Amino acid sequence: MKFPAFARKIAPFTVALAAMSACATASAREIGALTDAQTPTPIDMWSIVGFTLLAAGGIASAGLLSGLETGVYSLSRLRLSIRAARGDARAALLAREYARPGRLLSTLLVSCACAGWLASFGTSQVLDALGFGPVEAVLLDLAILLPTVFLFGEVLPKDLFRVHADRWMPQFAGVLRVLRVVLCVTGIVPLVAGIAALATRMIGGRAASESVSARARIAALLAEGAGVEGLSETQLGFADRVFTMRDITVLQEMRPWKSVAMISEGCLPAERARVFLASGVSRLPVVNSEGIAVGVVGAADHIAQPNASTMTLCRKPLLVRGEDSALEAIQSMRRGRVQIAVVADRAGRPIGIVSMKDLVEPLIGDLSGW
C-alpha cells in the first residue's frame, strides 16, 4: 500500500492523536508545576539523573516509534509476504500485525504520543529541579527539547527506517505485538479507533473495510512491488494476464470444428500425406463414420512411418469441455503429454480443437514461431 492511501486512512487517527498529544503535554506541565508547589525543597541529584534518563528514554522511544510508523508506509508487503511464506517467524508475525493496518497505525500513534509525554514530563521535572522559573523552563524547552526531538525523534529515525524498512521492520515485530496487546487490553487503541470512526462519519467519509479477497490482496501486493527495486512493467503485465487467465475458457480459444482439417479412420497413407501438405498442420484429428473423433495423428509419426495405416499411427484423443478454463485445459494436456485436444460437447460430439499454443498465447503473447 502506497503512502497516499495510508495517509488517507490514518487522517482521522492523526486528528485524534494530535488532540491527545496536546492534552498530554499540558498535563505534563501541570504535573511538573504541582510537584514543584508540593515540594519546596530542591530535588536531589539522583532524582535529576532519573528524570534526565526518563526524558532521554522518552525521546529515544519517540524516535523508534516514529521510525516504525514510517516503516509501515515504506515496507514492501510483497517482500514481507515472500519472507513469511519461506518460514521467517518474525516476518510472519509482522504480516499478521500488518493485516489490520488501522489498528497497527493507531497503536504506533498512541505509543508515540505517550513517549512524547514522557520526554516532556522528564524535561520539565529536571528544569524545575534546577530552579528555573515557568517562563525560563518554557524557553529552555523550546531551545533544547524541541530541536532534540525534531532531530532524534523525527527526522533521523524516519529517514533510516524509510531506507531500511524491509530489513528492520521484521526485527521489531515482537515489540509491535506487545504494544498492540497492551494498548488494546487497556482500551486505549479501541477508544482511538472509535474516535477515528466517529470523525470519519462526521466529515462524511466511510470506513474502509480491511477484509479483502485473496485475489485483490495479491493484486495490491504486485502493484505495490512496482517501481525502484521492485517489479518491472513487463512483470506486472505478466502477473495481470495470469489473473485474467482464470476467466478465459476453452471455448474462447478453440478453433471451430468446421474449420479443422481432419482425416477418416480409413484414410490411405497417400491421402493422409496430401492432407498434411495442404493444411500445413502438425497434427490431424481422426474421425469415424459418425463424425466422432477417435484419435489424433502427428506429422512426425507419419514421416517416420509413411506407409503405415492411419489407425496404426492414431493416438487416443484428449477430450476437454468448452466451459473448462484455459488453466484447467493446460493442466489436463500437460498430464496427458499432448499438444492438441478435441473440444467436445456433453454428448461427446466434437465442436472444435485447441492446442497448447492457443491456450498459452493469452498469457505470454503471440507465438507465431510455434
Image: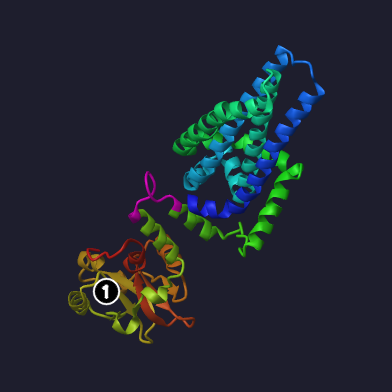
- State yes or no: residue 227 in magenta: yes
> Residue under circle 1?
309
Residue 162, image x and y in percent? Answer: 47, 39
Q: Is residue 243 above or below residue 292?
A: above
Name of the residue lying farthest toward the bottom: 290
Q: Quadrant of residue 108?
A: top right
Depth check, front residue: 281 or 315:
281
Which scheme is used to colour this image of the protein? rainbow
Q: Is residue 110 above or below residue 202?
A: above
- Amino acid carrying label 1: it is Ser
Q: Is residue 75 left or right of residue 120?
A: left
- State yes or no: residue 345 in magenta: no
Q: Secondary structure at mark 1?
A: loop
Depth check, front residue: 227 or 87:
227
Residue 91, image x and y in percent? Answer: 55, 39
Is residue 336 among what the camera can see? no
Q: Residue at x 79, y 19 (%)?
A: 40
Name of the residue lying farthest toward the right: 38
